[in-house]
Image (spheres, helix red, strand yellow):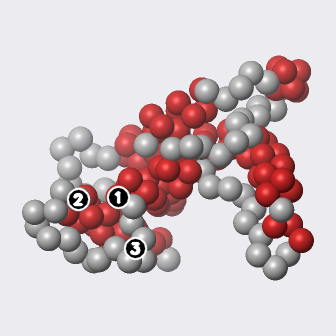
Amino acid sequence: MSELLTERDASAPRDELAELTGIRTGHSSAPTDATLGRLLPDFHRPDQDTELTADAVNGRLNAALRSVNEPKIIGAKLAASSTMLATLPEGGGDVSLTDEEALSWLTALNDVRLALGAMLGISEDTPDQLPADHPHAAHLDVYHWLTVIQELLVEAMM
């Protein structure tokens, strides 16, 4: 996941405004990769009943919002995953976290779940369990395990 985000960040177009102001901008278009698309979704999805449903308007609005905000979002996601990896005990075992580290873990776990869910094509129609011989059975089990870990972490933070 971190590699996908790093590649996305590094492939952002050269930005003259950033060179002048120090304010980085990123891609203006949504990722074509489904996993990245889940991690970096569009910012604006209007109701079908509004006047803003025209693709051109939505496209311009999302492009502007993405360009300004995507570098910060990617940076925050990478920082959270880095903190999580840095606070994992080398040999396994109990983990003690500060409030800030716990928030980073929560962010990173959520991103891993989103990425795995996108890779597996998880939807509301996905069964809770797949047959043992299904090629994604173990992956779905990991997805559910991450969900439980995330829930336990939220409860511990309350």
* x and y, in percent, of residue 19 in the image: 82, 20
Point 32% across, 47% down: residue: 88
User: Mark 2 or mark 1: which comes first in sequence?
Assistant: 1
83 relative to 151, above or below: above
Direction from residue 121 to residue 28 in the image, left or right: right
Direction from residue 97 to residue 88 in the image, left or right: left
Mark 1, secondary structure of its residue = helix
* x and y, in percent, of residue 33 in the image: 51, 44
Tag shown at residue 6: none
Tell me which amino acid carries mark 2.
His
Mark 3, secondary structure of its residue = helix
The N terminus - image quarter? top left
Pick whichever, 17 or 121, lies toward us: 121
User: Mark 3 or mark 2: which comes first in sequence?
Assistant: 2
Mark 2, secondary structure of its residue = loop
- Residue lying at the far left of the rendered structure: 133
Pick whichever, 125 or 1, lies toward us: 125
Please say whether residue 102 is visible from this viewpoint.
no
Pick whichever, 147 or 4, lies toward us: 4
Residue that carries the numbered disc 1 in the rendered image? 120
Query: How far is the residue under mark 3 from the one under mark 1?
Result: 21 Å
Tell me which amino acid carries mark 3.
Glu
126 relative to 64, above or below: below
